[in-house]
Amino acid sequence: MVAPLAVDIDGTLSRPDRSIDSRVLDVLREWDAPVVVATGKALPYPVALCQFVGVEERVIAENGGVAYVNDELFYFGDRDAAAAVREGFADAGFDLGWGESDLMNRWRETELAVSRERPLDVLTDLADEHGLSVVDTGFAYHVKATEPSKGAALEVVAAELGYEPADFAAVGDSANDVELFGVAGESYAVANADDAARGAADVVLDESYADGFLEAARRVRGE
Ligand SMILES: O=C(O)COP(=O)(O)O
Ligand SMILES: [Mg+2]
């Protein structure tokens, strides 16, 4: 039997421009075990991805701040602290960098995502002040509670599905995948992964982005 899969979105199922590489869709749809989409994105994005792919909605969002499985929602983040950092950042004279409608944070419930063009030192100081940490995914700075992570959430999601986290194969590309790689039984970093993810993975793949995911999928299936 093939291992259940925990898979990151940006940098892993995507092309460099963040569009989803269509070749991954049928691989996910036909995966012969549960697929958990584990992302830094807000909850609606992985839910929509599961629906469009045609698999059950089993998701970890906001870097482990929120999870959904078996019609149950789990919250692990710290909304109030994230809201306080948002206020502090505005008081310091900065917007979050996503424009007026802020689609990046509009549906985000437990953390704050800030453009990498904004000053990291100001953000880190504010995060410290409110007991939060900052993770740089290469796509955005995420201000989040320190304890929740994709890995901590996989402990809960796996149990709900009747698995151990160690039964899972995980594929990802960045610092927000490190804890996921820590709890999964086998972990794969795509070749475009950052140093943190490369260091935490069991295997650094030859291929980048979605080609890397497809390579990992072949390896997990033993091909
Ligand atoms: O939202 C981000 O910054 C990264 O998202 P990812 O975890 O799917 O790569
Ligand atoms: Mg990623």
Image (cartoon, helix red, strand yellow):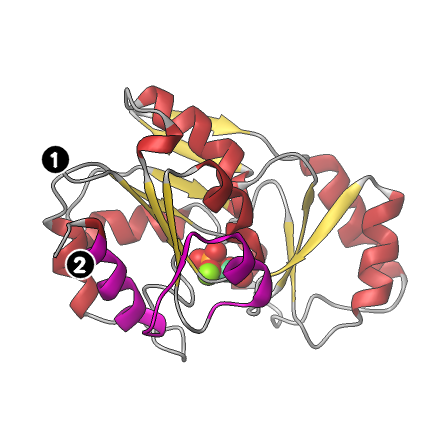
Nearer to us in this view, 17 or 170: 170
The Cα–Cα distance between marks 2 and 1, rounded to whole angstroms, is: 14 Å
Q: Quadrant of the N terminus?
A: top left
Which segment is the magenta one? 193-219
Q: Earlier in the sequence, mark 2 or mark 1?
A: 1
On screen, residue 57 above or below 137: above
The three-letter amino acid code for the residue at tag 1 is Met
Q: Secondary structure at mark 2?
A: helix
Residue drawn at x 70%, y 66% is 96
Residue 221, visible in the rendered structure? yes
Q: Which residue is mark 1?
A: 1
Q: Is residue 70 magenta?
A: no
Q: Secondary structure at mark 1?
A: loop
On the rendered structure, is 22 left or right of 41? left
**Residue 30, image x and y in percent?**
9, 49
Residue 83, visible in the rendered structure? no
Q: Quadrant of residue 89?
A: bottom right
Residue drawn at x 56%, y 40% is 149
**Residue 162, image x and y in percent?**
28, 19
Q: Which residue is mark 2?
A: 218
**Residue 175, image x and y in percent?**
58, 57
Residue drawn at x 40%, y 80% is 17
Q: Is residue 200 magenta?
A: yes
